[in-house]
Structure formats: C-alpha cells, structure tokens
Image (spheres, rainbow, N blue to C red):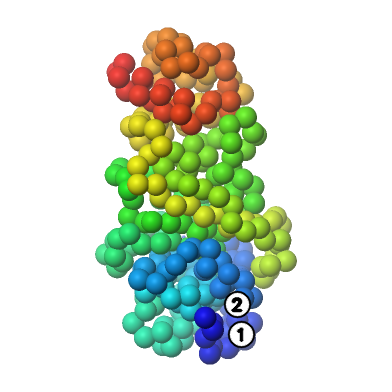
Amino acid sequence: MAIDTLPPLREVIARHNLSARKALGQNFLLDLNLTAKIARLAGDLSGTDVLEVGPGPGGLTRGLLAEGARSVLAVEKDPRCLPALAEIAEIYPGRLKVIEGDALQVDPRAHLSVPYAVAANLPYNVGTELLVRWLTPAAWPPDWSSLTLMFQREVAERIVAAPGSKAYGRLAVLAQWRCEARIAMSLPPGAFTPPPKVSSAVVHLTALPEPRFPADPEVLSRVVAMAFNQRRKMLRASLRGLHPAIEDLLREVGIAPTDRAERVPLEAFCALARAVAAAR
Ligand code: SAM
C-alpha cells in the first residue's frame, strides 16, 4: 500500500521544530519504508484498532494507517508532536485519534474495540513497565491480541530467552507463559535519529487463548520475582520467604532446592506456583 501523500519526516520535524529530547526517550524512525515494514510485522490490521504509544512525529503511525488499521489511538506525552500528528489525522479522516498524555496513565479501553493490537517504538524509559502491565492483567485473554514493540536488543533477548541462558528471567517467564513471543526484526543504532547507543529489536507477542500451564497469575508473578531477584542464590534461599516448607514444595514439583532460578523451565515455575497456592 502507498504510504501517503504527506511530506518526508525530516521536513515534518524541521517544520515543527521537533528536536529530539533525551528525557522523553526520543529516537525517531524517519524511513517510511522501515515504519511500513514494522507495521506489517503487526499482521493483518484491516478491521483492527491499534494502540500506539509514543507516535512522535508519526512515522510508525503513518505506516499503521497505510497498512489498513481501522483506527489508531496514539498516546503521546510531548505536546510539540501534536500539530504533526494532526496533519496525519486530516488525511485519514476519522481513523486517527491522538491523546496527549502519559501512556502509563491512559486507559485505552474507552477508545478502542477489544481486542486491539498494540504497536510502538517505545520510549525506553517506560517500555519495560508497559510490557509488564500488558503481560499481567488479572483476566486472560487480555484486551489486546498482539504486541509489536521496539526494545533495546538486550531487553528483546530477555523476553524470548530460554531457560539456562543468562537472559532468562522474569520477563521471559511472564511473556512466554501466556504468549507466543519472537524477535521479528533487528535494527542497528543508525536506523534512528538520533542514533541510540545500543542496537534495537522489534518483538512480536501474540496472546494465547489460554496460559500454557495453569497457575494463579499473582502467585506465579511473586514466585518468579523472588526467584530472579537473587538469581545467583539457590532456590531454597531465594524463596525462603515464600513458604515455611519451601524445600518440600520444591521437591514435590521436581525442582532441586539447590538449583538456581535460571535453570527452571516455565512449566516447573507454574507447578511451583500451584503448589505454593495449595499449601497456603
Ligand atoms: N514512534 C516514533 C518513531 O518511531 O519515530 C517515536 C519513537 S520515540 C523512541 C518515543 C516516543 O514516545 C517519543 O515521541 C516520546 O515523546 C514518547 N513518550 C515518551 N514517554 C512517553 C509516555 N510516558 N507516554 C507516551 N509517550 C511517551
């Protein structure tokens, strides 16, 4: 699909004086072929509403709309970006709504049909916090069907990591328990203006209809947080505060109390969460 008839992003940025601000995590994508490619990673968007966090000057927003998203709700904290986004809204009548505000405070349900897709070149300073929120709603399936998110490469690797690797931790367990998660694209620093210090990657997560293994979300979150908080310690020590008989519970589900969190597969963490819940 042709992207649109709006001017190139460099021109938009110059005209609206959008010099990048570090405090807002502003590393812009100016190549519209690239933003269209990222939008396509989100899958078929026709008939789907999309939540975009941090549209900035609107490169990815333009990609999402050109790729056929039914509507885009864009939440942007920097008021300087609003005039540029208003120009996009004008050529896609009724399909782009912009909310000026902090994505951590905005509830998208009032504006979008469920399930919606989420796509974002996330501000690094709030990216992980937003991801954890999207991954830990009380009810499953969640309001969103997929997340297509740019992260620092190192964070992307933590999301898709397998047990036994250094990157395996809380993010991997929370993401892989109820989602299909993969790295869909890698980007060098030079793809952004200004270039960040590190490489980036787009992660695509699809919500599974049901968790892979049964567990209470709150108990599992607590078990995993404690286990990885002191990841070098043996589980019998790191999980001591969880239950007085933690060593017995670990053995009951086939985990050696002397093992460390990074060697425990997702299924065993879920079994441990069930055992802890049952022993309360
Ligand atoms: N999507 C644009 C692109 O790809 O070029 C901009 C990406 S830039 C990495 C991150 C954007 O998120 C910036 O426009 C920044 O102002 C915005 N932002 C930062 N913190 C935010 C927050 N808490 N809520 C909403 N937007 C935020």
Tag 1 residue:
8
Q: Is residue 213 above or below residue 78?
A: above
Q: CA distance from mark 2 to mark 1?
A: 8 Å
User: Residue 100, percent across and down?
Assistant: 40, 71
User: Residue 101, percent across and down?
Assistant: 40, 66
> Residue at coordinates 29% horizontally, 65% vertically from top-left?
113
Please give left or right for residue 23 compared with residue 208 in the image: right
Q: Say which amino acid is labelled 2.
A: Leu
Q: Is residue 4 above or below residue 52?
A: below
Residue 213 appears in the rendering: yes
Between label 2 and label 1, give the one nearer the viewer.
2
> Residue at coordinates 58% horizontally, 88% vertically from top-left?
7
Tag 2 residue:
32
Q: Is residue 205 above or below residue 234?
A: below
Residue 151 appears in the rendering: no
Q: Which mark is residue 266?
A: none
Contact, CB < 8 Å: mark 2 with mark 1? Answer: yes
Label 1 secondary element: loop
